[in-house]
Image: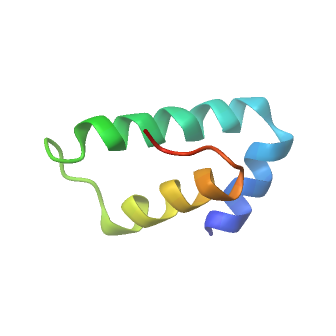
Amino acid sequence: MATDLAKQAESNPTVMGKLVGWGKTMANKASETTVSEAAKAIVPLALKLVGIPLP
């Protein structure tokens, strides 16, 4: 799933923007909100696959 998301992000600027936004939100709010375990694993992996490090 992360690979598919990364491929979509590479070819679609809108998906890339959403992916980056999700990554930032998760990095900033993970301790304050409940985020599913799947999202916690998939979004950072997809960001890594497109070459964007998390802060």
Q: Name the residue located 47 percent from the left edge and 44 percent from the top edge.
A: 54
Q: Is residue 54 above or below residue 35?
A: above
On screen, residue 34 versus residue 42, left or right, reads: left
Q: Is residue 30 above or below residue 40?
A: above
Q: Pick out the residue farthest to the left.
A: 32
Q: Position of residue 52 (x, y in %)?
A: 62, 43
Foreground pick, 4 / 20: 20
Q: Position of residue 48 (x, y in %)?
A: 61, 56
Total tally of numbered discs in the picture: 0
On screen, residue 50 versus residue 41, left or right, reads: right
The colour scheme used here is: rainbow
Q: Quadrant of the N terminus?
A: bottom right
Q: Name the residue located 81 percent from the left edge and 45 percent from the top edge.
A: 10
Q: Is residue 31 above or below residue 55?
A: below
On screen, residue 47 versus residue 12, left or right, reads: left
Q: Is residue 14 above or below residue 40?
A: above
Q: Name the residue located 24 percent from the left edge and 38 percent from the top edge.
A: 29
Q: Position of residue 46 (x, y in %)?
A: 61, 57
Q: Name the residue located 58 percent from the left edge and 41 percent from the top edge.
A: 19
Foreground pick, 28 / 8: 28
Q: Pick out the residue farthest to the right.
A: 11
Q: Quadrant of the C terminus?
A: top left
